[in-house]
Amino acid sequence: MHDAVASMRETVLRELNRKMAEECQCTLRKSATQAVPGDGSVLAEILFVGEAPGKNEDLQGTPFVGAAGKFLEEMFRSIGLSREDVYITNIVKYRPPDNRDPHPEEIADCVPWLREQIILIDPVVIVTLGRHAMNHFFPGMKISEAHGRPFRKAFPDIGTRVFVPLYHPAAALYNGNMRETLKSDFLRVPKVLETTKRNQKNPKERFPETYPR
Ligand code: URA
């Protein structure tokens, strides 16, 4: 059963990634080397969503392969996981020139792919990396207040989802305090995963939609 689901999802994901590379309307496609669709398991319980591919990602076609990616892998190991156990992607599927922030219209062109990825993989928990990925799902939320905390929110297109916003590994890499905060926030993810799975069977604890103001 597991194998059948995996192989069906892999086929659909391959087709989705092909379309992303050939049909995405995003203007970033013109300056980028290639699409960076995502990496990992189609059966992942945790989906990591970053902002946009950088230089190394653009060259290799794989998300989080540079210094931030190495740090992310170190944090996967800290919770007993590897890249192969999770799925990693970005809001925007093409590298913005000079690593600038993606523009709203570029995000709008790329998010339909992310939406399809979320529906297909159907992760238990979505971990957003950095302010931009978090604000896509939670406009106006402050990363300094939200980091490391679980939230639950209903969307018309992707259904009700549980999120843990984290600091971006690239931002935390060279900032000692943020680095330690990110590492300790990361250790909370398995607990959120287990609680969410338990809640699916027997809803007891509810995560809030936002933090108390
Ligand atoms: N930063 C991101 O947000 N995504 C990547 O894939 C790499 C660096």
Image: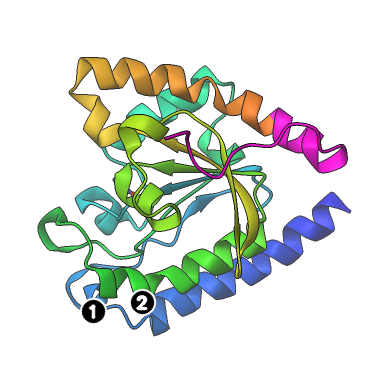
- The magenta-colored residue range is 194-213
Q: Is residue 129 magenta?
A: no
28 above or below 168? Answer: below
Front label number (1 vs 2):
2
Asked which secondary structure carries label 1, the reply is loop
Asked which secondary structure carries label 2, the reply is helix
Amino acid type, label 2: Asp
Question: Would residue 191 be found to the left or right of residue 150 on screen?
Answer: right
Q: Can you identify the residue that label 2 sits on?
A: 109
Looking at the image, which residue is at 24% across and 26% down? 173
15 above or below 136? Answer: below
Identify the main secondary structure in magenta. Answer: loop
Q: Earlier in the sequence, mark 1 or mark 2?
A: 1
* Tag 1–tag 2 contact (CB < 8 Å): yes
User: Mark 1 to mark 2: distance in Å?
Assistant: 8 Å
Expressed as whole percent of the image width and height from the top left, the position of residue 114 reads 49, 64
